[in-house]
Image (cartoon, helix red, strand yellow):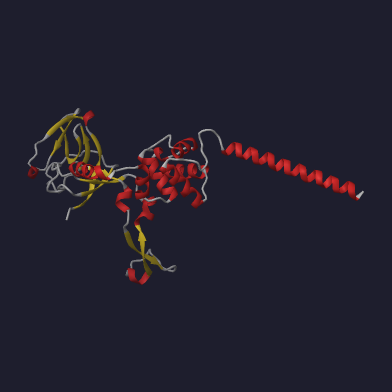
Amino acid sequence: VIAHLSLCVQRLEGMDQAVDDSHRKVDQFHETKPGRPQNHTTAPFGSLIVTAMKLLGLKYKDIVTETERLAKLHNNPDMRIAKSTLGNIISGTIRQPGTAKIDALRIVLNLSREDIDAALGLQPEKRFTEQLELTRARTHEVSLDAVVRNRKLRMPVVRDDANLEETQFFDAVANRWANLEVEYLSSYYPPHYCYVVVGEEDRNASPVAPPGSRLLVNTLLDKIRPAENLSYHERELFYVMTPRGFTCAYLEYASDEKIVLVPHPLSGNVREEFRQSEIRIIGQVVGVLYPE
């Protein structure tokens, strides 16, 4: 009887092992679907992603879920990365993803812009000076990453029993102060704001916003209102795209079909008239940081 029971146990153990082997093969089949390489890539950017995923313990579905959350948070559907797209990026089939997807991967995988640029081979040294000169010459938007990178903000840590509904000296309710990396606050950054640098060749808003100025633009404010009896320091300044590129200038309606681009009188530039279909009002300038 004991021998018979021993034989039955061995057979049951063999069946369990067979079931485990079968499940393992099924898992391997699902993990090695065509077009979705697992940890095997010769692309530098793909290797960077795979290494970061291992360190953080993330899987494909985790990346998809997080990028979907970022897309909703920033109201930018281009930030979403599907499983197949992620596989193609890792394998190198997609050599350089779009800016929104790169930003999403940077945030989810906690990567630095320098590491990503190096992996993608962006801005080779021999062309860096030329690219820098082109950037300085034209008015352009800068990414949030460039604004918050390597910057710190001194923030108060308020006492647990503090009542912020009453007016009082702030030092009395602050428990301590801490230096916080601005990059950690990027998820709270209003998506309708953008940063713009006035190019060296753009003098339409000078001297209110001379070349080299850093501008904060609210993209929700894009309506032209009458500017009667207002000085140029009170008039609304807009960041717009014209047939010749981006510029910052004042705007007026010439008719129902035309818009006049109005430069500051001290800029030395002349007015230009465009059809409304030729002008795209990106937003109103709500803040100016002057060049040193």
Q: Position of residue 156 (x, y in %)?
A: 36, 65
Q: Position of residue 291 (x, y in %)?
A: 17, 53
Between 280 and 203, the residue placed more toward the observer is 203
Q: Residue furthest right?
A: 1
Picture quarter containing residue 47? Answer: top left
Q: Position of residue 17 (x, y in %)?
A: 73, 44
- Count of picture labels: 0
Residue displayed at 72% across by 41% down:
19
Residue displayed at 65% across by 41% down:
24
Q: Is residue 170 left or right of residue 132?
A: right
Residue 278 appears in the rendering: yes
Relative vertical location of residue 80 with respect to residue 149 in this rendering, above or below: above
Residue displayed at 43% across by 34% down:
93
Q: Is residue 38 left or right of residue 115?
A: right
Residue 75 appears in the rendering: no
Between 147 and 51, the residue placed more toward the observer is 51
Between 92 and 150, the residue placed more toward the observer is 92
- Quadrant of the snapshot with the C terminus: bottom left
Relative vertical location of residue 153 with respect to residue 57 in this rendering, above or below: below
Q: Residue furthest bottom?
A: 172
Q: Position of residue 185 (x, y in %)?
A: 37, 54
Between 187 and 218, the residue placed more toward the observer is 187
Q: Is residue 51 left or right of residue 130?
A: right
